Amino acid sequence: AQTVTQSQPEMSVQEAETVTLSCTYDTSESDYYLFWYKQPPSRQMILVIRQEAYKQQNATENRFSVNFQKAAKSFSLKISDSQLGDAAMYFCAYRSAVRPGQGNLIFGKGTKLSVKP
Amino acid sequence: EPEVTQTPSHQVTQMGQEVILRCVPISNHLYFYWYRQILGQKVEFLVSFYNNEISEKSEIFDDQFSVERPDGSNFTLKIRSTKLEDSAMYFCASSVRKNVDTQYFGPGTRLTVL
C-alpha cells in the first residue's frame, strides 16, 4: 500500500523569506501524481501544485515550486517570498495513475505553516 | 470560477440519528468523492462515485454509510446511525476524470455527534 509521510508537524517562516516543506512517499508504482494542498483556517482544501511522476521537470506555480526526486521518493514544496496568507496546514497527497479504480488521494498528516510578520 | 459547494457548513446531531450531507460538484465533472478529516488527523478517503454507482470505497465506508446522486446536480453522503466517532469534517470533491485529473474540494461540512 502507498503511504505519504510529512515529517514536519509545524514550520515557521518570516514574511518574505523562503521555506521548504518536506514530503516522502512509498510506492511500487511507476506512474502516479503528487499534490500539495493548502488548508487555511477556513478548512477548505485548496490545490497548490501538482506533479506528474513521468515528468522530470519540477512543477512551478508562481511563488510555489516543488523539488521532485523520483528515485528518492521525495516531493518537497518550496514557498518563496512567504506572505501572511500562506499560513495554513499543508498536505502532501499521492494518487495512483496506473491502477484502475484507484482514484483516491492518499494524504500525509500535514505540516502547519506559520508566517511571522 | 466554478467550485464545489457543500451544505450545511455545520451539522450537529444526536448519536443514533441519521444525517445527510450534501454536495454540488462542478457541473462538467464526472467523478465524485467523499473524504473525512477527524480533528487533528489526516484526511481520509471514504468513497468515490461514477456513473451512478460506487467506484471504490475504503474500509471506513461500512454499511452505515451510503452515497447517492438523487438528481443531476447533488451528491449526498448519508450516515444512517451516527456514532460519536463520526464527528469530523467531511469533504466532497469532484474531478472530470478519475486517475488523470485534479480533484477539487468543497469547503467541507463539520459534523458534530453528541
Image (spheres, coloured by chain):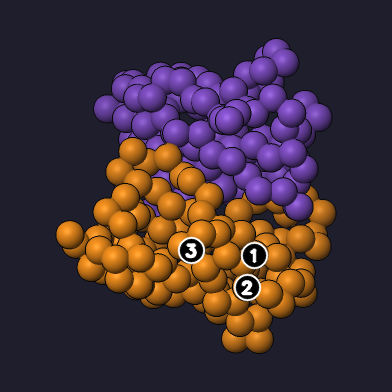
Chain colours: A orange, B purple
Residue lying furthest bottom: A71
* Mark whose residue sits in front, 1 or 2: 2
Of all chains, the one bearing label 2 is A
How far apart are the two marked residues, 3 and 2, measured between alpha carbons?
A: 11 Å
**Residue B101 visible, this angle:** yes
Q: Using residue A28 as the reference point, say whether residue B40 is left or right of it.
A: left
Instruction: Tell me where residue B1 appears, x and y as whole percent.
Output: 58, 30
Secondary structure type for disc 3: strand
Residue type at tag 3: Phe
| Residue A58: image tag | 2
The residue depicted at 46 percent of the width and 20 percent of the height is: B7
User: Is disc 3 in the same subunit as disc 2?
Assistant: yes
Q: Which residue is mark 3?
A: A64
The residue depicted at 43 percent of the width and 52 percent of the height is: A38
Mark 3 or mark 2, which has the lower sequence index? 2
Mark 3 touches mark 2? (CB < 8 Å): no
